[in-house]
Amino acid sequence: MNRQNEKPQDKLEQRLQKFIARFNEIEAKMSSDGISHEEVIELSKERSDLEEIVEAAKNYASVASQIQEATHMFTNETDRELIEMAESELEILKKQEEEINERLKLLLTPKSKEDKKNAILEIRAGTGGDEAALFAAALHKMYLKYAENQGWKIETISLSENDLGGYKEVITSFAGKDVFLKMKFESGVHRVQRVPETESSGRIHTSAVTVAVMPEAEEVDVHIDAKDLKVDVFRSSGAGGQHVNTTESAVRLTHIPTGIVVSCQDGRSQLKNREKGMQILRSRIYEKLLDERDKKSSESRKNQVGSGDRSERIRTYNFPQSRITDHRINLTLYKIAEIMEEGRVDYIIDELLREDFQRSMLQED
């Protein structure tokens, strides 16, 4: 077969067969005589990684077989009642097939070590003053809703508000399954077009917010020597600059080799602020190391969705037209209220993951 004429579904099934064959090979090795304890541990880990794919592949094959049977009945039956039954069954089965298919694409997308990590989300108001800060708060609410829908654990690490209840900066950690894998494409500039609440003439303004998503780094990923760290303490301040704490509980951490600076003043405890600050600092250093690694790999950058640069304009939210456009994949949806208020950002994230899957399939050719 000419590989250029292969359908994506054919490629998907070929990859599934490879995974199933490898899974069966591992099962046979683990039950063989003379296998060492170290080999068992190593094979058990690989088997665990493959198990979910193999289970989904079996479900997919079972549903495909049922669709074939129902289609045969629908095409060849003469009894009207049986035809209607087959038609109803086909509708249910095709929906199941589509759901399993999407799950398989997610499972089969090549994953890096970082994709399995939790994530730290940073949202900063950019161009647009108070309106940008209000939109930063709305974006944060959207991501919190999305995280709740996914069943992730949420923790606010740091928050800086303005007088109108907008966010100048907010940093949040998400923990759970597939967090960084699903959130990593959200990094970049998010532009909003709407009439600000403070605008009396009804003119549409354009503002911007910067989003950064970093894999949460642990000490094993990034070791920070005490000699490379400068620690300053100061008083926490709230919206408008008023002091909310009379003690020096806020912490500023400076990583001298990279020049990365982190300030944390959300908690009342200096120790707690230092812990949260170190969490952010490790992740920013880790992100910098990953970025340097990716820049060395031109193939990796060529095949990724977007540049991965937080200064890249990735999405526009047009409220008067109820329209959201993701510029990287030319996706436009007229569901702004549902996406923003109900956290249905999965409408966009799922499309980005599909695009990433398709590119990974092409890369294998």
Image (cartoon, rainbow, N blue to C red):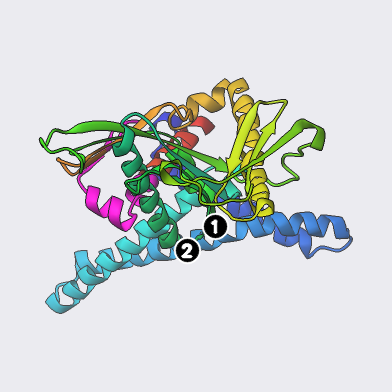
The answer for how far apart the CA atoms under marks 2 and 1 are is: 8 Å
Indicate which disc residue 177 carries. Answer: 1
Residue located at (10% from left, 35% from top): 201
Instruction: Say whether residue 80 is left or right of residue 347.
Output: left
> Which residue is label 2 attached to?
151
Can residue 228 be found in the magenta stretch?
no
The quadrant in which residue 225 appears is top right
- Please tell me which residue lies in front, 317 or 332: 317
Give neighbour class at mark 2: few <14, some 14-19, many 20+ (Cα, 10 Å): few
Residue located at (46% from left, 45% from top): 242
Q: Position of residue 106 (x, y in %)?
A: 48, 50
Looking at the picture, does residue 61 appear above or below residue 283? below
- Furthest-front residue in this view: 246
* Range of magenta residues: 325-350
| Callout 2 amino acid | Gly
| Callout 1 amino acid | Lys
Residue located at (25% from left, 54% from top): 338
